[in-house]
Structure formats: C-alpha cells, structure tokens
Image: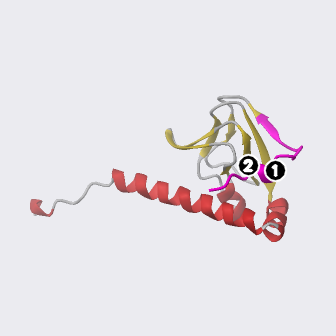
Amino acid sequence: MIALDNLFRFSTDFQLFSAGQTIFNQGDPGAVMYVVLDGQVDILLGSQLVETVDCGGILGELSLIDNRPRAATAIAHSDVRLVPIDRERFTFMVDETPFFAAQVMEAIAQRLRRMDAMASQRLMPYDYSDG
C-alpha cells in the first residue's frame, strides 16, 4: 500500500497527540477519520492490540463511512501528527482523487483480512470423535 501521508503533507489542520494519549475510544461517535503524518497509533479491541498504524496509514474510517460508533480504541503509540478528515473532505477527496478512495478501500480490506486471521486462530476445531 502506498502511504497517504504524501497526499496530506502540506496540511496545516493537523492534530497532535502525545504518546499514550487516547485519540478515540471504542463506542465513541466518529465524525472524522485520520491520516497519520508522523508517529504510530495503536488500535485496540478491548485490551487486545489489533494493529499499529504507521506514518501514511489511516484510522477511524469505518465510523466515518457508516455513521456508527467507533469499532475500536486508538491510542498514540508515540507522539503523532494526524490530519482529520471529516465527511465533507472525505467526499471531496473521493470525488477528486480516486487514488485516495482506492487507498481507503485497500486499508479496510487489509484490516478485515487481519481480523479474519486473528479470529480463525482463536477458533478451536470441533472434535467429531467425542461423539
């Protein structure tokens, strides 16, 4: 996946979060997604680390797309600089920059595959010999 940070490198509307600071909590309303310009963000389901999003990655896209509460918690792993993308900006970017839409879809697909792999590791096969 090509990083999205180049698309937003000149943005002046970034937000700063310190290492350990919560960006959003699972269950919070989600009006924006974020592009990571600098640093890393940990994504957690409950207390389990699901992913660490690096520079150029995105987070919070699901809530922006489906208007549902946050599916996970995001905590700054290091000091981070994030560009917030609200619905209006998201729609503009999708309309004007097809690359952006493709990158968002790719990020969602990768996350879904990672979650599927994690879920399948937790499932125990049924032992039919127990009868």
Vertical comparison of 1 with 19: above or below: below
Q: Residue 67 location, x and y as percent?
A: 70, 62
Decide which of 70, 12 is in the foreground and name it. 12
Report the residue at 64% width, 37% height from top: 75
Report the residue at 48% width, 59% height from top: 113
**Residue density around tag 1, few if under 14, some if 14–19, many if 20 or more, within 10 Å:** some
- Residue 94 placement: quadrant: bottom right
Label 1 SS: helix
Decide which of 95, 72 is in the foreground and name it. 95
Report the residue at 79% width, 54% height from top: 7
Q: Which residues are magenta?
A: 1-16
**Residue density around tag 2, few if under 14, some if 14–19, many if 20 or more, within 10 Å:** many
| Callout 1–callout 2 Cβ contact below 8 Å | yes
Q: Residue 77 location, x and y as percent?
A: 62, 33
Decide which of 30, 52 is in the foreground and name it. 52
Q: Amino acid at mark 1?
A: Phe
Decide which of 109, 50 is in the foreground and name it. 109
Report the residue at 85% width, 62% height from top: 88
**Can you tell which mark lies on residue 35?**
2
- Label 1 – label 2 distance at C-alpha: 8 Å
Rendered-image quadrant of the N terminus: bottom right
Q: Residue 18 location, x and y as percent?
A: 72, 29
Query: Is 9 a magenta residue?
Result: yes
Q: Residue 92 location, x and y as percent?
A: 84, 65
Q: Amino acid at mark 2?
A: Val
Rendered-image quadrant of the C terminus: bottom left
Residue tagged 1 = 8
Left or right of residue 18: residue 73: left
Query: Is 34 a magenta residue?
Result: no
